[in-house]
Image (spheres, rainbow, N blue to C red):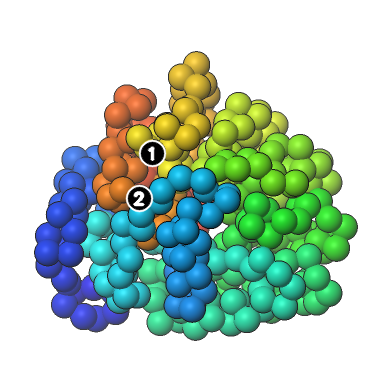
Amino acid sequence: MSPDGNAAPDLQALDPQGPAPQALARRLGIPGFVDVHTHFMPQNVLDKVWAYFDAVGPLTGVAWPIAYREEEDRRLALLRGFGTVAFTAMLYPHKPGMAEWLNAWATDFAARVPDCLHTATFFPEPGAHAYVLRALEAGARVFKVHLQVGGFDPADRRLDAVWGALADSGTPAVVHCGSGPAPAPFTGPGPMARLLARHPRLRVIVAHMGMPEYREFLDLAQRYEGVRLDTTMAFTDFGERLSPFPREELKRLVDLGDRILLGSDFPNIPYPYAHQLQALERLGLGDDWLRGVLYGNGAALFHVKP
């Protein structure tokens, strides 16, 4: 049975790549995967995101076929069928007046999807601190911030109270702050370094390993204990064509092994979900490292029970 009480789907019929992730979990002896970077959002918003990818938008600049363009219930069935036991509903505003509405939707989604880590977001605008506090009171466990799409400085003084609330509560924020796939005014390590200097206790999960500024974001992780990185699209064939990870930095991935978290960008990926897992396995950093990245590190951060 699935977590919503329905019969488990025939995963092979839904996705020919489906069984491979389950086999990997069994080999590693883990309950499944904790994926900190998956997207669920209101359908009208998701449709606009998909249309942007279909049109080869200027931030991507490359063909980007959506691998899992399915109805919400089928996307949930797929993700669970892969063996993903906890995931997020990454959503983000691109203008004022949008975040609070998205948070209301996300609260309802988390209530009806118990294996989703209740996700929220914010934007530098009047009232942001108040609605972030309301989201935390409603049970938000992780926030998503997209500096590229939102076009704002994370160190904007209007967000000081917001970041302070997240630091005080220990609530992580997944932040798209790297300059991939295209730079924007406030991407890159500089703005995040200024933010962390002001709020050093923040728990920040750098999306996409900070692609393409891998080294600089690994530096921040070494400097600040609360900084983690998610693997979203990194190390995949697609990601390596866009921004290859420097092989001389693989040792630092091992040194920071307890702060690397699985992320996938499901469903908005141009390849099978299994490929992200295979890309991590083929790094050859060892099964203990892989167990932590795929399950243990995320489970510890978000108190996920087996």
Which mark is drawn over residue 270? 2
Q: Is residue 130 left or right of residue 65?
A: right
Residue 258 spot, x, y in % from top left:
49, 37
Which mark is drawn over residue 204? none
What residue appears at the point 16 percent right and 77 percent down from the top-left corner? 7
In the picture of the structure, the residue carrying the numbered disc 1 is 238
Residue type indicated by callout 2: Pro
Residue 273 spot, x, y in % from top left:
30, 51
Q: Quadrant of the C terminus?
A: bottom left
What residue appears at the point 76 percent right and 56 percent down from the top-left corner? 152
Q: Is residue 271 left or right of residue 99?
A: left
Residue 156 spot, x, y in % from top left:
83, 55
User: Is there any visible trace of residue 170 in the rendered image?
Assistant: no
Residue 287 spot, x, y in % from top left:
30, 32
Extreme residue in the top direction: 248
Taking 1 as reference, is 219 above or below it?
above
Query: What separation in Å lies between label 1 and label 2 (alpha carbons)?
Result: 8 Å
